[in-house]
Image: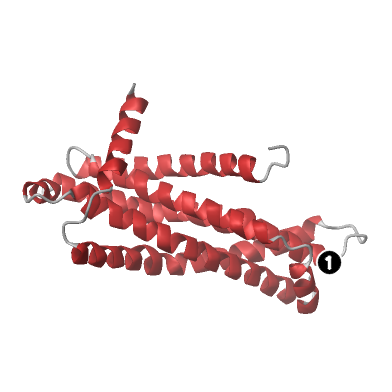
Amino acid sequence: MSFFTHFGRYLLLIKGMFTKPENAKMYWKEFMHQCNDIGIGSLGIVSIISVFIGAVSAVQTAYQLVSPIIPLTTIATIVRDTVILEFAPTLVCIVLAGVIGSKIASELGNMRVSEQIDALEIMGINTKAYLVMPKIAAALVTIPLLVVIAMVLGIWGGRMAGTASNILSADTFDKGLVMNFLPYNVTFALIKSYTFAFIISSIPAYYGYYVKGGALEIGKSSTKSVVVSCVMLLFADYVLSQLLLNPAT
């Protein structure tokens, strides 16, 4: 019963966001503030992770391809596809679930505990729309952009590691990079990124918005929101892969 209770309150939270804004300028200002916090604030960690993911992928792929029959261009092809299909959208969003999710949950939880949300509701403001919607909208705008940056930096990191380690030349990597490229893979990655963006912004917002207690409960809800978000990310990753990549479907 606890699952259905949480799920029902979560759906009511999402439903409560879709109302006409009382003051469009306030909503726009909050939206831009969240875009700065979520997008620009996470750019550094995303860049570092992406470069090293691509570098490690190139080195480990070269380590496993020991057969002289397999051309070196295969390394670039594998790095490209793994970064685009899985590493950039999934691994980056799992990291963002910890960075962004904990911030959203703790911010809303602190407002709930300090009765700021109650004060806004007394003033007649729809707190679900004013506090939650800009965060989800900002995540839907900025996180796919971060995933695209992660794709580019991941492939560049693999190229840099491959050439620096004398695994393959830059021309060989570039040749394998365009070999048998499927634009649908990028579309699939973007579909995943939009789905993951909604998950890692809405679930922490739910746990933060409905927190009860004090500072200890804020910490617990923040931790729980990150755990649930990561589990839902992995579940959504499997479902989307099964639906969109399985030839039998």
- State the image coordinates of residue 32 (x, y, percent, origin top left): 30, 67
Counting every numbered tag in the picture gives: 1
Callout 1 secondary element = loop
User: Residue pushed farthest front?
Assistant: 20
Could you tell whether 145 is left or right of 203 in the image? right
Q: Quadrant of the N terminus?
A: top left
Q: Which amino acid is tagged 1?
A: Leu
- Taking the image as drawn, is residue 18 in sight? yes
In this rendering, the answer to whether 111 lies above or below 178 is: above
For the residue pair 165 and 41, the one nearer the viewer reads as 41
Could you tell whether 77 is left or right of 30 in the image? right
- State the image coordinates of residue 92 (x, y, percent, origin top left): 51, 57
- State the image coordinates of residue 47 (x, y, percent, origin top left): 51, 68
Residue 53 lies in what quarter of the image? bottom right
Residue 15 lies in what quarter of the image? top left
**Residue at image coords 39%, 58%:** 139
**Residue at image coords 93%, 60%:** 69
Q: Residues within 10 Å of mark 1 (few under 14, many from 20)?
A: some
Q: Which residue is mark 1?
A: 72
Q: Quadrant of the C terminus?
A: top right
For the residue pair 98 and 233, the one nearer the viewer reads as 233
In this rendering, the answer to whether 70 lies above or below 158 is: above
Could you tell whether 87 is left or right of 117 in the image? right
In this rendering, the answer to whether 146 lies above or below 103 is: below
Colour scheme of this structure image?
secondary structure
